[in-house]
Image (spheres, rainbow, N blue to C red):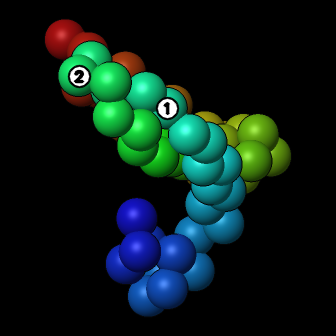
Amino acid sequence: MRTLKRKYHWPIETASFPSNTADGRAAWATVYSLPPEVIAAAMDAGARDWLKSRSM
């Protein structure tokens, strides 16, 4: 994620939150996402076709 954000300037959004582990310890979990408009632009630029070609 760091490389995509810093080197390639992807607009990756992050949200971190505390989470309990199975053994009772506390940890931090992070969710990474792309804004919906970025995903839509990628789909329009050929990502949709690329995904379809991989689902066979």
- According to the picture, the residue beneath numbered tag 2 turns out to be 23
Q: Is residue 9 above or below residue 46?
A: below
Identify the residue at image location x=41%, y=74%: 2
If the image is split into quadrants, where does the N terminus sit?
A: bottom left
In the displayed structure, 56 sits above or below 38; it is above
Please indicate, yes or no, whether residue 34 appears anywhere in the rendered image: no
Instruction: Give the SS element for disc 1.
Output: strand
Q: Quadrant of the C terminus?
A: top left
The answer to whether 7 appears left or right of 55 in the picture is right
The crowding category of the residue bearing disc 1, from other C-alpha atoms within 10 Å (few below 14, some 14 to 19, many at least 20), is: few
Residue shown at 49% from the left, 32% from the top: 19
Which of 34/50 is in front?
34
The picture places residue 8, in percent across and down from the top left corner, at: 48, 81
Q: Which mark is residue 40?
A: none
- Judge whether 54 appears above or below 40 on screen: above
Q: Secondary structure at mark 2?
A: loop
- Residue type for callout 2: Asp
Is residue 20 shown to the viewer in this render? yes
Q: Nearer the viewer, residue 29 or 32?
A: 29
- For the residues bearing labels 2 and 1, Cβ distance under 8 angstroms: no
- The CA span between labels 2 and 1 is 12 Å
Measured from the top left, where is residue 18 in percent x and y?
56, 40
Which circle marks residue 19 in the picture?
1
| Residue at image location 49% in from the left, 85% down from the top | 6
Q: Is residue 47 left or right of residue 33?
A: left
| Percent x, y of residue 9 | 57, 80
Q: Quadrant of residue 54?
A: top left
